[in-house]
Image (cartoon, grey):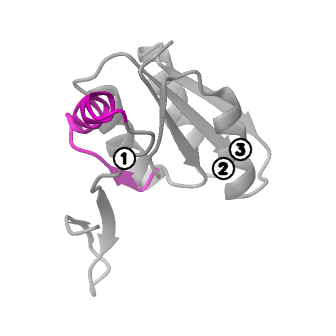
Amino acid sequence: MPKVSVIVPTYNVSQYLDECMTSLINQTLEDMEFICVNDGSTDHSLEILQTYAAADQRVKIIDKPNGGYGKAMNVGLDNCTGEYIGILEPDDYVKLDMYEKLYDLAVKNNLDIIKADFYRFVHDEDGKLVKNYNCL
């Protein structure tokens, strides 16, 4: 059983997905699984996920017709096998040691729930893609 399962509900986020997935597969906590639920994306999101799955056995893809965020999350939850479950929106990314720190704190303090900051991609007033570091 992995220590942490992370659900990535995915729908038409190809412009953000590489950085999101890179932040997951390079986590310092290695005993993880990544449940990527492709919810009928019509862009290149599925192909990007397939590239990561081919390179890392922890990446599991569930490809389903579009049914909305709630259904995608439920499918992800049904497929998690980890001791803890995390959710990472595909237009966000996390520090490379985040899940290790969260897991250690949760175990040390016998916590059922723990929350952390995250980074989000945003566009400035000129439409330029920037990173927002103040998300919590």
Can residue 50 be spotted in the picture? yes
- Disc number at residue 114? 1
In space, the residues marked 2 and 1 are separated at their CA atoms by: 30 Å
- Position of residue 131 relative to residue 66, above or below, is below
In primary-sequence order, the first of circles 3 and 2 is 2
Marks 3, 1: nearer the viewer: 1
In space, the residues marked 3 and 2 are separated at their CA atoms by: 17 Å
Of residues 27 and 131, the one drawn nearer to the viewer in this rendering? 27
User: Where in the figure is residue 99, as x and y percent of width and height?
Assistant: 30, 34
Residue located beneath label 3 in the image: 74
The magenta stretch is 90-110
Mark 1 residue type: Ile
User: Dot 2: within a 10 Å radius of its alpha carbon, few (fewer than 14), some, or many (20 or more) residues?
Assistant: some
Mark 2 residue type: Ser
Q: Residue at x 44, y 47 (%)?
A: 88
Q: Residue at x 51, y 54 (%)?
A: 13
Tag 2 and tag 1, C-beta contact below 8 Å = no
Q: Secondary structure at mark 2?
A: loop
Residue located beneath label 2 in the image: 41
